[in-house]
Image (cartoon, helix red, strand yellow):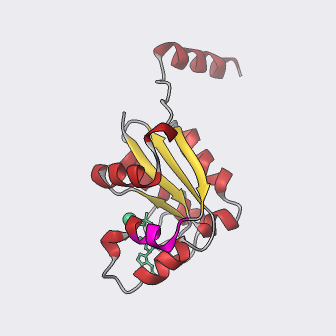
Amino acid sequence: MERTFIAIKPDGVQRGLISEIISRFERKGFKLVAIKIVVPSKEFAQKHYHDLKDRPFFNGLCEFLSSAPVVAMVWEGEGVIKYGRKLIGATDPQKSEPGTIRGDLAVVVGRNIIHGSDGPETAKDEINLWFKREELMAAKPLTSEAIALTEKKMDMS
Ligand code: GTP
Ligand code: MG
């Protein structure tokens, strides 16, 4: 099953948005298969954002990512890489739609509170960079019995 790497950046953690962000992914139906809170070193941040090394904001971005705790996660589900990016919204919160995480909760591009892998290759690389194999849980697939039970409960309420 498809997996993506999602990180709540230091600004998201400091602003108390961990549960808000996690709940948006959970409510959508994606499964959390790994989570930890870490302060990455600057070298680690540079590895994570290596594709941006020639951009003028690269140093500030890596300084910031390594300045305070980050919540690193792996989420699993059908289409989670692309749809995760949709939940997150555009890079610049001024251009993110309302209803997205950045659109609802952030204002400026340098403090856009969350990271999400941008494709299958980066998802694989970022999961391998941030997590050891044994840190990844196996998500239980949503069985047809579980779906039927959920629908039954909803009918009753
Ligand atoms: P991530 O999910 O964090 O990778 O963001 P993204 O994929 O939407 O954007 P991108 O990978 O191009 O940029 C990575 C991060 O660099 C962004 O999330 C921003 O925090 C930061 N960034 C991107 N563009 C700018 C910019 O023009 N100025 C500044 N200050 N920061 C930028
Ligand atoms: Mg990116």
Quarter of the image where the N terminus is located = top left
Position of residue 56 in the picture relative to residue 107 (left or right): left
Farthest-out residue, left = 121
Q: Quadrant of residue 32?
A: top right
Image location (x, y in percent) of residue 76: 45, 38
Q: Nearer the viewer, residue 134 or 150?
A: 134
Query: Measured along the vertical axis of the image, is residue 22 above or below residue 13?
Result: above
Image location (x, y in percent) of residue 128: 39, 50
At 54% from the left and 57% from the top, the residue drawn is 99
Count of marks placed on residues? 0
Query: Measured along the vertical axis of the image, is residue 139 above or below residue 107?
Result: above
Question: What predominant SS class does the magenta segment belong to?
Answer: helix
Q: Does the magenta run of residues contain 127?
A: no
Quarter of the image where the C terminus is located = top right
Position of residue 4 in the picture relative to residue 42 (left or right): left
Q: Nearer the viewer, residue 46 or 144?
A: 46
Query: Magenta segment range?
Result: 40-46
Image location (x, y in percent) of residue 29: 52, 36
Query: Measured along the vertical axis of the image, is residue 78 above or below residue 7?
Result: above
At 69% from the left and 67% from the top, the residue drawn is 14
Image location (x, y in percent) of residue 9: 56, 65
**Does the image show residue 95?**
no
At 34% from the left and 82% from the top, the residue drawn is 55
**Does the image show residue 49?**
yes
Q: Quadrant of ligand 1?
A: bottom left
Farthest-out residue, top = 145
At 60% from the left and 48% from the top, the residue drawn is 22
